[in-house]
């Protein structure tokens, strides 16, 4: 819009795209539907593209929309909660096109960024949040901006109602279950459960001796995270991972550390796991 005020930017969600296509089919308005996305849009922004998973007709329609826009030099921006290759039941031709663009992995904000966002949103509410309270709230929301907004709105309303100073004690008393309690200690057991859930494997496989690639890499990731986020020694970690020798843990940590700078997928996996672990 800054470059060309006459540009037409179309933003929608994948769910709305599907529902709009269904209505167009029902009322025989497909030409109108296609024109909106293929001819009228200079820039198309689709949120939650993973919603197309398993919807063959919608995927076919979106494929032709994608090709039409791409061939005419238009801009396409997609968001998803996973990488393209991780979207289940997505046509290969769509997956390859999604991966052919610039992939930007956006992780949840850290505590410092959350605190800055909190202050900015508090300013919009004409509410001054003391630094210690802002840090206390941010450390318990683990990167969730929507929960942050909800907590601030509730805090502002209660502050006006009770006319009390904004303190940690005030927030603890009135926000109740909205905020997590003190962060739980990270343990190898917790890391194993989270890694098993993330990679869809069993904890017993991670601590067992199976050598399948689909298990070896998650096992090494779990070892690396356990070493990074606990104070346990290599021998202690070896015992936590099924009685392994400490050298096995050292090898896994070294390998993941070497791969991380050049393996974008691995960095994404590590970031997602650390976010879910609250670190």
Image (cartoon, rainbow, N blue to C red):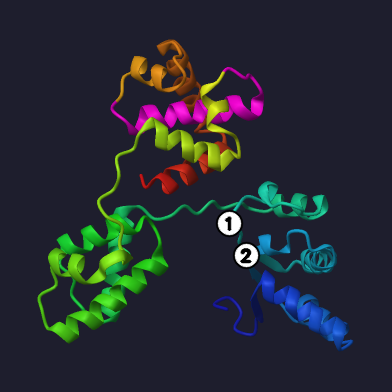
**In the displayed structure image, the side of residue 5 where residue 73 appears, left or right:** right
- Please say if the residues under marks 1 and 2 sit with CB atoms less than 8 Å apart: yes
Q: Position of residue 78 (x, y in %)?
A: 64, 63
Residue beneath the point at 68% across and 72% down:
15
What secondary structure is found at the residue carrying circle 2?
loop
Q: Position of residue 40 (x, y in %)?
A: 75, 82
Residue 126 can be seen, yes or no: no
Residue beneath the point at 32% across and 66% down:
178
Could you say which is closer to the camera, residue 122 or residue 176?
176
Residue 81's disc is: 1
Residue 48's disc is: 2
Q: Position of residue 137 (x, y in %)?
A: 25, 62
**Residue 223 painted magenta:** yes
What span is colored magenta in the figure?
209-231
**Quarter where residue 49 is shown:** bottom right
**Residue 225 painted magenta:** yes
Residue 62 can be seen, yes or no: yes
């Amino acid at each position: 819009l800054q470059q060309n005020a006459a540009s037409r930017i179309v933003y929608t969600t994948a769910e709305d795209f599907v529902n709009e296509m269904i209505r167009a089919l029902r009322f025989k308005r497909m030409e109108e539907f296609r024109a909106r996305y293929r001819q009228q849009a200079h820039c198309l922004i689709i949120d939650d593209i993973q919603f197309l998973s398993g919807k063959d007709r919608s995927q076919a329609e979106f494929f032709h929309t994608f090709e039409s826009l791409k061939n005419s030099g238009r801009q396409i921006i997609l968001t998803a909660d996973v990488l393209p290759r991780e979207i289940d039941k997505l046509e290969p031709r769509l997956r390859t096109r999604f991966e052919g663009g610039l992939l930007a992995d956006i992780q949840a904000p850290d505590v410092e960024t959350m605190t800055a966002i909190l202050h900015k949103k508090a300013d919009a509410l004409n509410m001054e949040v003391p630094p210690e309270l802002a840090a206390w709230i941010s450390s318990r929301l683990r990167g969730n901006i929507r929960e942050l907004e909800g907590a601030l709105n509730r805090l502002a309303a209660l502050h006006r109602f009770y006319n009390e100073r904004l303190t940690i004690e005030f927030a603890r008393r009135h926000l109740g279950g909205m905020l997590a309690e003190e962060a739980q200690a990270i343990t190898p057991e917790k890391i194993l459960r989270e890694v098993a859930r993330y990679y869809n494997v069993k904890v017993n496989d991670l601590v067992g001796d199976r050598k399948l690639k689909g298990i070896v890499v998650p096992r090494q990731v779990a070892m690396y995270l356990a070493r990074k986020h606990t104070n346990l020694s290599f021998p202690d970690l070896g015992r936590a991972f099924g009685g392994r020798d400490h050298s096995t843990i050292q090898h896994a940590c070294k390998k993941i550390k070497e791969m991380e700078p050049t393996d974008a997928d691995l960095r994404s996996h590590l970031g997602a796991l650390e976010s879910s672990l609250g670190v």
